Image (cartoon, rainbow, N blue to C red):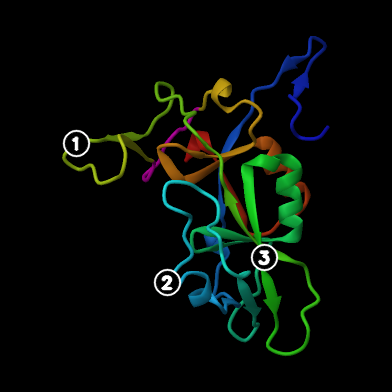
Amino acid sequence: MNGNEPRQAGRRGRQLKRRFYEMSFDYQRGGLPGYLLQNRETLVPGQKVLLAPAGRRGFPTYPVRPHFLLDRKAGRLPRDLEMFNDYWLVSDQTKAVFQAVDHSGFDFFPCDVSLPEGEYQGPAYWLCDVVRILDALDEAESRLKICRRGEADYRYIGDKFYEIAGGARLVFKEDAIGAARVFRMAYRVPTIICDDVLKDACKAASLKGIKFRDALEL
């Protein structure tokens, strides 16, 4: 099974309903980072952070590869997934799992890695972005606050915005998701949703640094 086939059970081949999760960096297991970007000014002159291009996800045309220095004296070394500005910083193993489960859901940009002393001989690292954006929320079945343009406290861009702070129950439309295993929510783009196939693949590979929360119990 390659992860993109429908899951079935029972003699009649009844298709099982997928479960969905908010997928994010595990902030609770943080600490000072020991992965330090060395060429930010070359990558994004005059900017303090790496950001996705306006109006879309993915990467701008960087003139060179991002160069990270791994320094244990500065802090902990990167796990399989770390948050870095507007993107994830992921290991080679994480990239392989993501691509095997949902090749078109992610975009990657290769990084150069060095050490304060000696030659780096460890795994490759990549900047990673979830580039698929879907309008797939079943608003009628979900429990959350929907902020709409024109309301007194509306402070977002677009016609509406989903607010999930303080708790939410998110139900998604299978026909709007199709075979996708990961996506961003159209009206809450920072939030990344994955299904149980991708979650299980990450767990099976023992990837570190990823947090999953049941979308029905946020």
Residue 123 image position (x, y, % from top left) = 77, 68
User: What segment is highlighted magenta in the picture?
Assistant: 164-171
Q: Please, what is the three-letter code of the amino acid marked with disc 2?
A: Lys
Residue 53 rendering spot, x and y as whole percentages:
46, 54
Residue that badge 3 annotates: 79
Taking 50 as reference, is 178 left or right? right
Q: Quarter of the image holding residue 112?
A: bottom right
Disc nearest the viewer among 3 and 1: 1
Q: Can you name the residue that lies furthest to the bottom here?
A: 117
Residue 218 against residue 1 in the figure, above or below:
below
Give the Cα separation between the discs numbered 2 and 3. Answer: 23 Å
Which x, y percent locates residue 207? 72, 56
Classify mark 1: residues with Cα within 10 Å, few (<14), some (14-19) or many (20+): few
Q: Which amino acid type is shown beneath numbered disc 1?
A: Glu
Q: Which mark is residue 151?
A: 1
Mark 3 crowd level (few <14, some 14–19, many ≥20, 10 Å Cα):
some
CB atoms at circles 2 and 1 under 8 Å apart? no
Q: Earlier in the sequence, mark 2 or mark 1?
A: 2
Quadrant of the rendering where the N terminus is positioned: top right
Foreground residue among 153 and 134: 134
